Image (tube, rainbow, N blue to C red):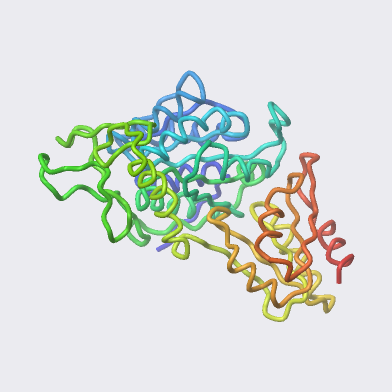
Amino acid sequence: MLKTAFWQGNQAIAEGAIAAGCRFFAGYPITPSTDIMEEMSRRLPTLEGRFIQMEDEIAGIAAAIGGSMAGYKSMTASSGPGISLKQENLGLAYMAELPIVVVDVMRGGPSTGVPTKVSQMDVMQARWGSHGDHGTIAYSPSSVQECFEIAIKAFNAAERYRQPVLILSDEVLGHMREKVFIPPEGSYSIVDRKKPSTTVENFVPYQADPEDDIPPMASFGDGYRWHITGLAHNDFGFPSAKEEDVEKNISRLVRKIDRFRDDIVEYETYEVEDADTIVLSYGSVSRSSLRAVKDARQRGLKVGHFRPVTLWPFPDKEIYQLAKKVKTIIVPELNCGQMVLEVDRAVHGKAKVVPRNLVNGELFKPDEIFRAIQEVV
């Protein structure tokens, strides 16, 4: 039997993380993500988990990485400038292939910006904030229910692909309160990291399985010895500048996500089959967009809605297929135009792409998006 709760989005992310098996959280308070940290501080000690408030954002992600090394499913959470501070250690987690979940409850920027207002200004930071090439997985929930569900998906993806996974929430979702249906334990899929099956003597820490390009992961304390570094390394984990080692190392960090792109990408559509115009939006903006699309449909306008659930990998192939059938794609977002660049790239000139941007700290109202629809139909 389904249980129900009346949660805020931040609480739902914390509860979803716990449902996925998260038993270690380290972070630092920052508006508007602090509720996640507070919830984890209450809940983890009752589950034999560990919670640590660190001295700053850098230490928060460093401790989460350490928790992952020790075998814990680990998470940290922050907003805006805190996510910027975490980027260097995020890169370490990509290079060393350490599964963690990083939650970004987006707020206005740059710098301190508008701490208490909503934005979607971290879309490109999520993809490219940490220097170097790597595959990125980033989810964008649009409801409190989905905050819970995506937290589970994020941990499953982190464990499955051995890398950091991001959740891009925002201030509106973080503080919105909605009814949530809580599935019974055991009714949803839980993924745990692949463990070594070889002997301690024959263990090669970064020797990838040919089936999925992902090496099994030992935990510190299991008896296996392995070296962790942010440097390019060979299969034994030791730093190497040899051309063949560097090429093999970096290429696999990208390939292991590209290879399973179709398994990772998620999206939702509404009334796109006969649409001439598509509104493409994500996160909290998709709520206003969907209302505007429904209003347009009631007035006889052939409008549909496309919502990326995964912002990265980007659903470019799916958008291209839509672009071949529609005239216009409207992209409302709470920034000066970040995701619209990816949409424009994906359509290959098959449809007109129209940005609608809002950066005043408020959420789009449905009638604002409806007016954008009227301008192009």
Q: Quadrant of residue 202?
A: top left
The relative height of residue 49 versus residue 258 in the rendered view (above or below) is above
Q: Quadrant of residue 228?
A: top left
* Residue found at x 70% / y 53%: 341
Q: What is the residue that sits farthest to the right in this orientation?
A: 375
Where residue 184 sits in the image (x, y, percent)?
Answer: 37, 58
Please identify the quadrant where the N terminus is shown: bottom left
> Depth check: 188 or 274 in front?
274
Where residue 355 sits in the image (x, y, percent)?
Answer: 79, 55
* Residue found at x 74% / y 67%: 349
Where residue 138 sits in the image (x, y, percent)?
Answer: 53, 49
The relative height of residue 127 versus residue 340 in the rendered view (above or below) is above
Where residue 214 sits in the image (x, y, percent)?
Answer: 31, 51
Q: What is the residue that sits farthest to the bottom in this orientation?
A: 274
The relative height of residue 350 versus residue 284 in the rendered view (above or below) is below
* Residue found at x 67% / y 59%: 345
* Residue found at x 38% / y 52%: 156
Q: Is residue 312 left or right of residue 60?
A: right
> Depth check: 246 or 364 in front?
246
Task: Tell how many labels.
Answer: 0
> Depth check: 370 or 252 in front?
252
Please identify the quadrant where the C terminus is shown: bottom right
Q: Quadrant of residue 311?
A: bottom right
